[in-house]
Amino acid sequence: MISSLRENRSNKGNQNEMIKITTSNWLRFPGNCFHARSFSCQFLGKSRKQFARMAAPNYHSRMIILQANQLAHSFGADDLFEDVSVMLHAKDRVGLVGPNGVGKTTLLLILAGLLEPTGGTVKREDDLTLGYLRQEAVLTFAGQENTVYEEMLSVFADLRGQEARLRELEAKMEAGEMGEAVLDEYGRIQTLYEHGGGYDYQHDIKRVLHGLGFEPEQWDVPLEHLSGGQKTRVLLGRLLLEKPDLLILDEPTNHLDTSAIEWLEKTLRTWEGSLIIVSHDRYFLDTVVNQVWSMSRHGVKSYKGNYSTYVQQREIEWQHEETVFNNEMARMEAELEFIRKNIAGGKSDIAKGKLKRLTRDIVLIEEVGLLGMQGKNWLQIGERVRTFTVNEAAQRLKELPTPTSRMPKLKIKLKPEQRGSRFVLRTKKLRIGYPDNPLFNCEDINLERLDCVALIGPNGSGKSTFLRTLMGEIPPLRGKIRLGDGLILGYFAQGHEQLDVDRRVLDEVLAHKPMSPEEARNYLGQYLFRGDEVFKLVGDLSGGERGRLALALLALDEANFLLLDEPTNHLDIPSQEALQAVLEQFDGTIVLVSHDRYLVDRLATQIWELRMGDGEENGRLHIFDGTYQEFLATKEGGESAITTISSKVALPTKEKELPPVNLDWIEDVVDPLQFTEEDRRTRSRRIRELTEQIEETEVWLDQLNFDLARAEGEQKEAVERELAVAQSELDSLSTELDELMA
């Protein structure tokens, strides 16, 4: 049942999970709620309002359940946001997006009734039940002794009470007490029990716990022994079982692995109530929401559709704003030119009038923006503003800000210093892990330039260890690694271990690459480090700020082979979008470890999936040659899908008994063959020549295949002969290159 109605919800630490908003007293029955005065309604467990909604579905679908008008909130003298107005209908599934620091969490608290705004009003539907999930639920279960499973059971306290009463009545009937009163009570309670989901609730609990990643051995763990992330998942599970009319979720995917996120997506897609979700997971928003609220410090704008649809609409709006702004700037610059020419001439009165109007326009754009001028009292502004001089007007016009809807974004530049060879990475019979903790075996890898690999798998399966192995920091337990010629590696560590926490931001950049302090400050400005922020200690930066600094250092490496370990962690959505745009245009090779499925979906040409167990002692890395969508189709389609696109899938093979651990071969990774320096230069030169010849031959083959499709008779035979020669040459070149790379 709705948790706020339990006696233990009097504790302030728990007042933020589930709220009952009502103007009258309620009775609670299993799975339903209804007003005491409506008990005579013939529809069991339904209020008159609920009965009316069933009789009039159109009314229900468009009914406004929550409305906020002109909300504002301040912390002391600092204004967080203002003029926020939103409207939520029944069945709406809303994604709330906006840059970090704009006040999204504060707005959720206000809408949930947990925080009073400093301005504006919130109106909620009478009798609305509302559930709220904080980002962190560390203090949520303070003083409670429940286990994980007991906490889920507490949602169904009324049902369990009915179970107990049914058992008592059954005992009476077995003892021969078969009176009319006993039979009537038994029938009534049994009906309530059945309608309330009494025969399904234990199954529902197990389904939710399994979906959120709780193994059966964890169900009996006391809540006080759980981590903060586990407590948040417990709270989420309880809210899903409580099924409030409105569920408000603040970053619900933060503590979930990919499989749990996918399960939550499926659950929320069929959610019967309304949703408001704040999330940096764009793929999650794409899948779940049907409306987006885009928030800035000056309001919220609503868009119909999922996240991708919102991005398209927003881009069109931004382009329109910039066009209007540029046109208006051109008009005002023409006005200024007229004023300059005529301010002291025969048309001075006209010029002075134009200067007064130009002053008013400039001040108005400065205060509310070009697109915020509608409805403003221009005359009033004109009366209180001193008319500018011509030079002052010119300077103020030059300094006018561009439209504010397009938020400042990272200006990332990832440009490789050199192209590198076509063949980037090859492995054979690779085993990853540590001598006392082997992690997984790998299918043989053949990675080429411009490929983008998404490395996915459960948390703790060894993805970061694999990246460090490719870098040579950790030796493999078995097998060979071959890196291509001319590679420059760039590594983005998930925990930003490469950053010196005792350095200032500016000094970290200066230590990474020689440049002047002024150049470094200008460079850091591209990563949104402005003013005195460059003098902050790295150790004092937020997670998002450290991520931006790590990206800034990565860009200075000018690498052509990027190993990226959760690069979008802690980045707000505008920064995620900026990084995505840069990686889409990157002229090199990428191995990407990320829970950001939106990024994976846009970039990946291969999926490397880590499966733990998989019929082996340890896990195994499976290689799928295709996009993320193709991978999902194969995964969901099972064997039939694998058969359909078998050319895209590398099926697992059973390995023989592994040989003893041998680390001597690791020297081969650094220098595969013990060449002299001259030999090494000759070999590198020949690899480059072969790579270029292979690329030219492949172009030749493509042209010949094109000609063959259109040739006839003797011409066709000639093309076929030339095609055979080209194919033979390609095979010969490839064989030579393979031998050099082996």
Image (spheres, rainbow, N blue to C red):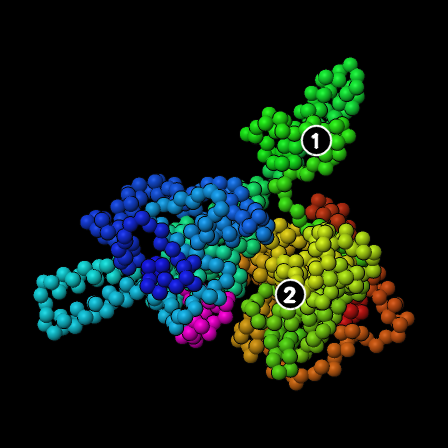
Q: Position of residue 3 (x, y in %)?
A: 36, 60
At x 52% / y 64%, what residue is drawn? 255
Residue depicted at 71% across the width and 17% down the height = 350
Task: Give the residue pinned by disc 2.
Answer: 494
What numbered label is drawn on residue 148?
A: none
Q: Residue at 28%, 67% (x, y): give it.
A: 160
Give above or below for 144 relative to 246: below
The chief SS type of the magenta part is helix
The residue under label 1 is 329
In terms of depth relative to the viewer, which is nearer, 208 or 469? 208
Q: Amino acid at mark 2?
A: Gln
Query: In front here: 737 or 113?
Result: 113
Q: Secondary structure at mark 1?
A: helix
Above or below residue 646? Residue 22 is: above
Number of residues whose C-alpha sits closer than 10 Å to that of mark 2, classed few (under 14), some (14–19) or many (20 or more): some
Percent x, y of residue 37: 22, 49
- Judged from the image, the secondary structure of the residue bearing numbered disc 2 is loop
Residue 589 or 382: which is nearer the viewer? Answer: 382
Quadrant in the picture for residue 207: bottom left
**Measured from the top left, where is residue 19 in percent x and y?**
38, 55
Residue at the image position 76 percent from the left and 27 percent from the top: 390
